[in-house]
Image: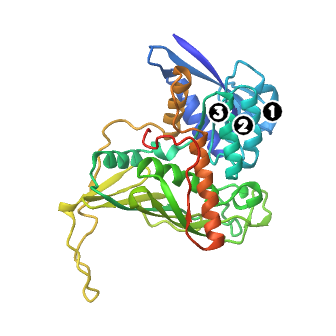
């Protein structure tokens, strides 16, 4: 039996909303026949596209097979045929739109960061709890094949005692002033519009660290605006007011030390745009978006420092690829399916607004650390959801 579920999708004309959430998640689910339920039924999502640009919406809806669309979000929220509200619009507008959706009795799923500050994120989490509807935040990195393999290693005890985590994220975003356009929207570089790499990426790092290795206890961070001006989508030069790089150390529960560099001003000399290495007493592993390699202590070469002779060891030779162990689907789609199943079956969804609020909290405290040039503790926040339940 097929059950229909209407989803108001706000902000899907943007790159992430179009590619990951609409095309590769909701429409892909529809193409494959819906989301299978435990009782044998199938849940079929029915999207209603919402945006401010009527021409762009109409063109998109027609191109994708005649989807429903509207520029009137408030009217859509009153439509009982659509019990789910999804938000992938700009961060500065999210709090108001989500509060309106909750007031209309909608279940809500939205992109990260949840809001631009911790106070707003807490307001949304508390409002969602009062509304009694299912609320969730996108945490796509947890569902990437490379990270899932890394988590498998953690759960198996492969590392022994985990000592440290080191992440490297970023790539060069072109300035737009010498012939090549930038790959990211200009608002990313304006703090007043919700931009900045700390707010954007530390929401990712919080759930990735919390759910995979251990809760973040403290942080030390330095940020930078390395490129002071860029050219926007209309060819106009503008001043960058938001950070485009951040270098942080995190202390996790259990004494694990994590270092993550985040940069839109770095050139890539690694296998993927994001890599994360974990070192433990019994072994090490390095993962990217798709792959993961390990080196057990019995395969670890006995390196000796000697700068007077050429290196004789191929350090990459002793690493082994972790097998897939199954099919990996699109990370965004996987989390959409988990959310929709939880909604249909009345089960908890661990990636809730409190989990999203913790990501905003870390970004805010990291920014404060940068300004004050010191270590800062990260206090507990919210409902204390089990970070291990992914």
Badge nearest the viewer, 3 or 1? 3
Tag 1–tag 2 contact (CB < 8 Å): no
Task: Say which quarter of the image contains residue 82.
Answer: top right
Q: How far is the residue under mark 3 from the one under mark 1?
A: 28 Å
Q: How crowded is mark 1: few (under 14 residues within 10 Å), some or many (20 or more)?
A: some
Q: How far is the residue under mark 1 from the one under mark 2?
A: 16 Å
- Mark closest to the chain's N terminus, 3 or 1: 1
Q: How crowded is mark 2: few (under 14 residues within 10 Å), some or many (20 or more)?
A: many
Q: Is mark 1 on a helix, strand or loop?
A: loop
- Mark closest to the chain's N terminus, 1 or 2: 1
Q: Is mark 3 on a helix, strand or loop?
A: helix
Q: Is residue 15 above or below residue 308?
A: above
Mark carried by residue 129: 3
Task: Say which quarter of the image contains residue 313.
Answer: bottom left
Query: 66 or 296, which lies in front?
Result: 296
Q: Is residue 320 above or below residue 356?
A: below
Question: Which residue is rendered at x = 53% and y = 64% of the image?
Answer: 219
Mark carried by residue 71: 1
């Amino acid at each position: 039996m097929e059950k229909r579920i209407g989803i108001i999708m706000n902000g899907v004309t943007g790159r992430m909303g179009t590619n990951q959430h609409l095309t590769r998640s909701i429409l892909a689910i529809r193409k494959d026949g819906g989301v299978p339920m435990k009782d044998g039924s199938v849940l079929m999502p029915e999207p209603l596209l919402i945006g401010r640009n009527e021409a762009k919406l109409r063109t998109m809806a027609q191109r994708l097979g005649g989807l429903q669309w509207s520029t009137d979000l408030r009217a859509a929220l009153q439509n009982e045929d659509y019990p789910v509200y999804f938000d992938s619009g700009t961060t500065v507008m999210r709090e108001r739109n989500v509060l309106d959706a909750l007031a209309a009795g909608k279940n809500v799923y939205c992109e990260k960061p949840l809001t631009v500050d911790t106070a707003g994120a807490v307001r949304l989490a508390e409002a969602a709890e009062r509304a009694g509807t299912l609320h969730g935040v996108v945490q796509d990195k947890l569902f990437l094949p490379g990270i899932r393999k890394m988590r498998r290693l953690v759960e198996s005890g492969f590392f022994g005692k985990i000592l440290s985590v080191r992440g490297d994220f970023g790539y060069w975003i072109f300035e737009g002033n010498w012939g090549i356009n930038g790959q990211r929207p200009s608002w990313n570089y304006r703090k007043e519009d919700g931009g900045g790499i700390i707010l954007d990426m530390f929401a990712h790092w919080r759930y990735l660290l919390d759910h995979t290795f251990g809760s973040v206890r403290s942080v030390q961070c330095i940020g930078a605006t390395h490129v002071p001006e860029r050219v926007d989508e209309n060819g106009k030069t503008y001043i960058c007011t938001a950070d485009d790089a951040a270098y942080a150390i995190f202390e996790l529960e259990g004494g694990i030390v994590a270092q993550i560099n985040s940069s839109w001003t770095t050139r890539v000399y690694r296998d993927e745009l994001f890599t994360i290495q974990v070192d433990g007493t019994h072994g090490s592993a390095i993962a990217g978006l798709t792959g993961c390699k390990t080196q057990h202590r019995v395969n670890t070469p006995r390196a000796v420092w000697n700068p007077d002779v050429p290196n004789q060891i191929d350090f990459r030779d002793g690493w082994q690829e972790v097998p897939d162990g199954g099919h990996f689907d699109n990370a965004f789609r996987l989390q959409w399916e988990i959310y929709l199943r939880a909604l249909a079956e009345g089960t908890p969804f661990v990636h809730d607004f409190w989990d999203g609020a913790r990501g905003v909290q870390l970004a805010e405290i990291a920014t404060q650390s940068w300004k004050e040039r010191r270590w800062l503790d990260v206090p507990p926040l919210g409902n204390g959801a089990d970070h291990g339940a992914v």
